[in-house]
């Protein structure tokens, strides 16, 4: 008389490639999270120079204006802008992209005709008042 005993296969263990794939997904998730965390902090703006309109100089819009050199830092480098306007938050006004370094402004001269920026390199930038008065 023969009897057949049913033999159950051993519990399936994850094979090595499955474990490595799972580990790879975890590592990928951590790397992606770190990348998104860094990217969320960019771009950053920093005012590296500021000059307020002199009290002795007035414009037709009767507003106080300011000039700021703003450094924009991004993942691929940095850029600079001159901002002139009446909004202290720098969100609205006249902007000029320039190539410079953060400590490059030597002097700023406000006149009724506009504002002149003299850089340490000897370069000058003149922004006529018509570009920044009246809320432009």
Image (cartoon, helix red, strand yellow):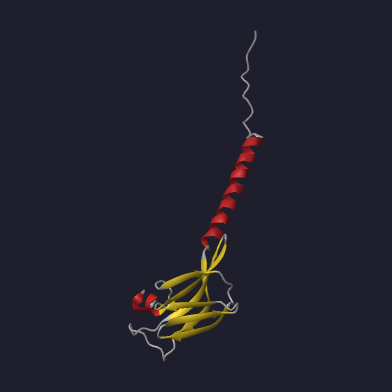
* Residue name at image x 63 percent, y 17 percent: 5
Where 11 sits versus 114, above or below?
above
Where 27 sits versus 69, above or below?
above
* Residue name at image x 62 percent, y 14 percent: 4
The quarter of the picture where residue 106 lies is: bottom right
The quarter of the picture where residue 9 lies is: top right
Where 5 sits versus 87, above or below?
above
Residue 102 percent across, percent down from the top left: 58, 74
Residue 113 percent across, percent down from the top left: 41, 83
Query: Closer to the camera, 131 or 20?
Result: 131
Residue 110 percent across, percent down from the top left: 45, 85
Query: Closer to the camera, 111 or 80?
Result: 111
Q: Quadrant of the N terminus?
A: top right
* Residue name at image x 54 percent, y 67 percent: 79
Residue 74 percent across, percent down from the top left: 54, 63
Of all residues shown, which one is farthest toward the top? 1
Asked if residue 8 lies left or right of residue 42, the reply is: right
Of all residues shown, which one is farthest toward the bottom? 56
Q: Quadrant of the C terminus?
A: bottom left
Where 11 sits versus 98, above or below?
above
Q: How many marks?
A: 0
């Amino acid at each position: 008389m023969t009897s057949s005993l049913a033999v159950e296969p051993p519990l399936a263990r994850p094979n090595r490639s499955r474990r490595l794939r799972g580990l790879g997904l975890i590592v990928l998730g951590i790397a992606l999270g770190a990348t998104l965390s860094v990217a969320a902090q960019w771009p950053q703006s920093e005012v590296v120079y500021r000059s307020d309109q002199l009290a002795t100089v007035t414009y037709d819009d009767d507003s106080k204006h300011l000039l700021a050199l703003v450094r924009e830092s991004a993942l691929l480098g940095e850029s600079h802008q001159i901002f002139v306007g009446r909004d202290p938050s720098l969100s609205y006004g006249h902007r000029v992209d320039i190539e410079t370094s953060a400590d490059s402004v030597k002097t700023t001269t406000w006149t009724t005709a506009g504002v002149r920026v003299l850089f340490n390199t000897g370069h000058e930038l003149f922004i006529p008042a018509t570009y920044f008065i009246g809320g432009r």
